[in-house]
Amino acid sequence: MYIGKYSVVRLEMFLLGWLHAHKGTVSDSNVFFDFLESVKQHYQVKVSVPGADVISLFSYDEKDALEKFFKLFEEYLEKSK
């Protein structure tokens, strides 16, 4: 996967596009959407904005946002077990 630069927004768009292209063939696609909702809950954001934008808002720069994305995703997966 190549997204061109450190960008949590580009990563989210890539993953959403991939999930859309494989609609009906990915049995656990809800995991990603549930994760994005958990990001909003983590940062106590109550408005309808993309999860990547929320992470970016609470990050120093794009590299920090991307690192936070993966950290939050790992935490989400651990809690979901």
Image: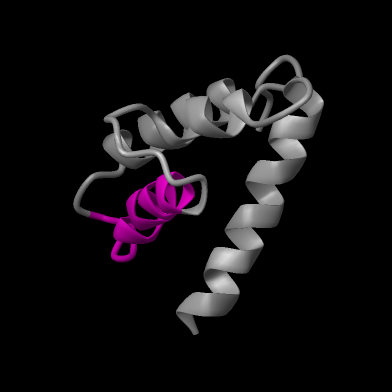
- Give how far across and how far down residue 65 sits, in percent: 70, 32
Q: Which secondary structure type mostly characterizes the magenta part of the structure? A: helix
State whether residue 52 is above or below residue 10.
below
Question: Would you identify the image quadrant in which residue 4 lies?
Answer: top right
**Location of residue 57 in the rendering, given as x and y in whole percent from the top left corner:** 59, 24
* Side (left or right) of 5 relative to 78: right
Residue placed furthest toward the left: 24
The verdict on residue 32 being magenta is: yes
State the residue lying farthest toward the bottom.
81
State the residue at coordinates (77%, 20%).
Answer: 61
Q: Residue at x 79, y 32 (%)?
A: 64
**Toward the viewer: 7 or 50?**
50
Please give the name of the residue rendered at 41% of the width and 52% of the height, measured from the top-left corner: 41
Q: What residue range appears in magenta?
A: 25-41
Front residue (pair 53, 11): 53
**Quarter of the view holding residue 29:** bottom left
Residue 79 image point, x, y percent = 53, 77
Please tell me which residue is depicted at 38% across the width and 34% down the height of the picture: 16
Is residue 72 in the magenta section? no
Could you tell me residue 35's position as x and y percent? 43, 54
Q: Quadrant of residue 30?
A: bottom left
Image vertical order of residue 5 relative to residue 74, above or below:
above
Q: Is residue 16 above or below residue 3?
A: below
Report the number of numbered marks.
0
Which one is in front, 62 or 54? 54
Give the side of residue 27 with respect to residue 44, left or right. left
Placement of the N terminus among the 4 image quadrants: top right
How is this picture coloured?
one colour
Q: Is residue 23 above or below residue 30?
A: above
Residue nearer the viewer, 21 or 51: 51
